[in-house]
Image: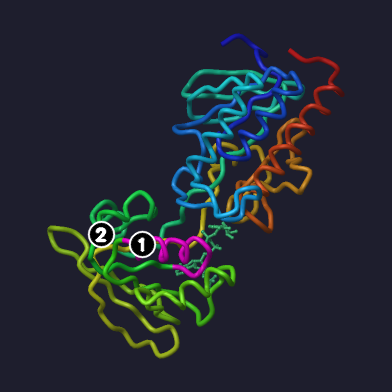
Amino acid sequence: MSALEYDVIIVGGGPAGMTAGLYASRARLKTLMLEKMILGGQMMTTTKVENWPGYPGGIDGPELMMKFQEHCVEFGLETGYGTVEKIIDNGDSKTLLVDGQEMTCRAVIIATGVVPRQLGVAGEEALVGKGVSYCATCDGAFFRELPIAVIGGGDTAVEEALFLTRFASKVTLVHRRDKLRATKILQDRVMANEKIEVAWNSVVGGLESDSSGLTGMVLRDTKTGQTRDIAVQGLFVAVGVTPTTGFAADILEMDEEGFIVAGEDTLTSIPGIYAAGDCRTTVLRQVSTAVGDGAVAAVMAEKYLEELKHTV
Ligand code: NAP
């Protein structure tokens, strides 16, 4: 890859990255969007998006992402596949180390999103694929007529619990407090669903398994300290997210959880590097906010390039 082949390199191909790509390509900037594996990000494992405007009744995440992708292609966005290992700031140019190869550009938009956070109980990692999962859409169908549990009280946990009632005989939603964090409409649906039982003020104290996989777990009441065993063959962990930002940790300012410090203008601590979508410090992480961020980041990059007075 020759030096300064691109005006902008976008790292990440979810809603934020694709929107940045669309805007940058439409502004006739020479743009490359780099994705590690599959375009679409977390939306690819989302069954139904109900709060993306324009689709009353909702739209499947993968279907929406296919439309995003088609739209990017219309404006000639170039997509590449590879893992960004490091970003080096050379002032007016940036070098990206991608699978050991150097790529150079003027501006970088980081839109790498987040991955599900682990629960952190003993045996969790060893039981992934043997009962423990972080994705109901991916693994729900393996638990037909079986009892399962979902851990967490946010939008993800509640959406996953509702989705899993299609398959499971019973879903225990385990939440560490006595009030769900999820949006009210989802809470109402959980309360109205006969297949869901909420274990309030409860945390997972341990996992039980045999050679076939997960067989149960120990729940501990956070108020009384009492423990009880429940039989479950599936455990879906939805206790929040961790940003995918490790590759930039040595150069960009991040908060204590690893989110890139950037405001609504997507500016990071380094001129010419922008952070868009779930990976930045923000109060809301949704497709709509990621899309807004992507657009802002591309426009900010365009202005920056104009100020540099040279594009590739
Ligand atoms: P979240 O909103 O951060 O919720 C995480 C949940 O897990 C909280 O209820 C938290 O409890 C609980 N938790 C955290 N650590 C725990 C631990 N160690 N043990 C037990 N429970 C633990 O994460 P999320 O639900 O993945 O959502 C992430 C973002 O995506 C949010 O902004 C959310 O609104 C958004 N999202 C939106 C939609 C939608 O609009 N349809 C769907 C999915 C996600 P506490 O409540 O006690 O803190």
| Residue at (46% x, 73% y) in the render | 190
In which quarter of the view is residue 132 placed? bottom left
Circle count: 2
x, y percentage for residue 69?
A: 56, 30
Which residue is most to the left?
A: 211
Tag 1 or tag 2, which sits nearer the N-term?
2
Residues packed near mark 2 inside 10 Å, few (<14), some (14 to 19) or many (20 plus): some
Mark 2 and mark 1: span between their CA atoms?
Answer: 8 Å
**Mark 2 residue type:** Phe
- Nearer to us in this view, 271 or 305: 305
Q: Is mark 1 within 8 Å of ligand 1?
A: no
Q: Are marks 2 and 1 in contact (CB under 8 Å)?
A: yes
Applied colour scheme: rainbow
Part of the protein shown in magenta: 152-166
In the image, which disc is placed on residue 144?
A: none
Which quadrant of the figure contains the N terminus?
Answer: top right
Report if residue 50 lies within the magenta region: no
- Pointer 1 residue: 164
**Mark 1 residue type:** Leu
Which quadrant of the figure contains the C terminus?
Answer: top right
- Pointer 2 residue: 143
